[in-house]
Image (spheres, helix red, strand yellow):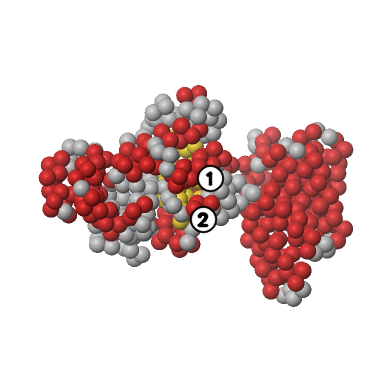
Amino acid sequence: MARAVKENNLVLFVGAGLSCGFENRNGQKLGNWQNLVRQIIENYEDLACLKPLAEEYEPITLLDLIEKRNDDSKNKAIEFAKDFFHLPADKNDYRLHKKLCRLSHKIVTTNYDNAFLRADEEFTTKTATIGKNYELSGLHKFSEKTLLKLHGCITDGEKMVLFPSNYADLYDSNNEDAERILFYLQNLIVNKTILFIGCGMGDFQINNIFSKVRHLLGKFNTKKHYIISKETKLDSKLDAKNQKEGGFLELISIKDYSEIETVIDELLKIKEEKDPTKIDYEKEMKELQEKLKNTTDKMKTLSIEHEMRGLDFYDLGEYDRAAEHFKTATEFDNENDRAFRYWGDALSELGKEQQDEELFEESFKKYEKATIINDKDAAYFNNWGLAIYYLAKRIQDEKLFNQVFEKWEMAYKLNSAKSYGVACGYALIGNKEEALYYLEESLKNKSVGIDWVLKDEDWKEYLEDEDFIGLIERYK
C-alpha cells in the first residue's frame, strides 16, 4: 500500500462508519443505518405499525416493507433522508475527511451525506453519481479529483440507492446508468489499490459491494486491496490469502476507531515525504508560475503551460501523459531546457515501470539536449546519471556504471547538494569510504532525510555497519 500511496494509485472507499458521529443541521447524530430507518419510522404516523419491528429486523427488511406500502411512504422516506443527512459547516469536525482528500484524488463512498463537500469545496463540481455521465468520466482520468457517490447523494433524492429495488437496479440489472457506473468502478478496482475505511463487515450495503468486487475481479484476481477494521479476522472468501477463491482484502486491524486517523497520518507521511530522486513538484511549479508571469512571448507561454500540465501528471504518477505534455512544451519552444529535462524524467520513470531499455535510451537523449542548452544546472546531470544508473543496475553493465559516476560528479561540482546520488552509487559498488563521505555531505546540506536513507534499498547492505550506524546517529 505504501507504494500505491507514493505513486498516487490509492483509491479510498469510505463507508458509513466515518459519518456516524456527525450531527446534522437539526442537531441529530447520524448514527448507523439502523438509526436512519428507526428515525424514518418514528417521524411518520402512517409508519407507526412498523415501530414494534424496528429493533427486531434488519434495516433493509424494514425499508422493503416501507417501499411496498405505497409511493407516498417511499417518497416521505426519501425526503426525510435528504434532510437527515444534510450536514452543517460549523457543527462537525471534518479534519479526518480533509486528510483523506489530501491522501487521494479519488474517493468512493456509499454515504449520502455532504461531509466530503464540507471538507473540500472542489468536490461541489466534481461529484459523480448515477446518471452524471460527464462527472463519471473523471474517474477514468486519475489526475482529476473525483468523488464517486456510489449510492447517490442528498442533492438528488430520486437517484439515492435506499430501497431494495434500488440495490437491485444498481447491482443486478442491465440498466444503462448502472452499467456505466459499475464500469468505472471496475476500472478502479482492477487498476488501482483500494483502502476501505468505515465499512462494517456485516452491513448489507458493504456485503453487496464486496460481492460485486469479487465478481468484477474474477477467479484470475492478482490484486490486493486493504480494509481498516476492528475485526481480528476476515471472512475466508474475502481474505487475500485465498486469492484463488476470489479473496482480495488484507486486514489492517485496529482496537479503537480513533486509530483510523493514526493510520491515515502514517500514509500521509509516506505520501508527503519528498523523494530526492524525483521532481520537487511544489518548488518547480512555483518557479514555472513565476516564469509564466514574466513571459510575454506567446510560444514560450504555451510551452510553460504544457510544462505545468506535464508536472501535474508527473506528480500523479501518470508518466506517459506527462511525457506527452513535456514533448509538446519543447515543440513550442525548442530551447526550453527544463522541458527536455522533465521529458527525460518522465521517460526514465516509464522505463522503470515497463522495464523498457529503449525508454531509458530515449530519456538519455532528452537529458543530453537539456545539458547542451544549459550545462550549468546540476539537476540535469544528476537525473541523467540516475536514469543511467537504473538501466545499468537492470542489465549489470559496468561501462554504464562509469557513466553514472561521470554525470553525478559533474552534478556535485555544480551543486554540492547533489551529493546523495553519488553516495548511493558508491554504496552500490561497495566503496564504503566514498559512500559515507558523500552521504554525510547529503545529511549536512539536508538534501536527504535520515528516514529516507534508512528505507532506501541502496543502503540495505550497510544497515548493520558500525560506521554507517554511527553516521546516522550523529545526524538524528
Residue topped by disc 2: 134
Residue 352 picture location, percent across and down: 71, 41
Question: Given the image, on which type of amino acid does mark 2 rest?
Answer: Tyr
- Alpha-carbon span between mark 1 and mark 2: 22 Å
* Label 1 element class: strand
Residue 264 picture location, percent across and down: 47, 48
- Count of numbered circles on the image: 2
Question: What numbered label is drawn on residue 454?
Answer: none
- Report if residue 46 is visible in the image: yes
Residue 420 picture location, percent across and down: 73, 49
* In-image side of 428 versus 85 (left or right): right
- Report if residue 262 is visible in the image: no
- Classify 12 as above or below 342: above
* Label 2 element class: helix
Question: What numbered label is drawn on residue 10?
Answer: 1
* In-image side of 383 versus 110 (left or right): right
Please give the name of the residue rendered at 34% of the width and 44% of the height, measured from the top-left corner: 166
Residue 199 picture location, percent across and down: 37, 42
Q: Quadrant of the N terminus?
A: top right
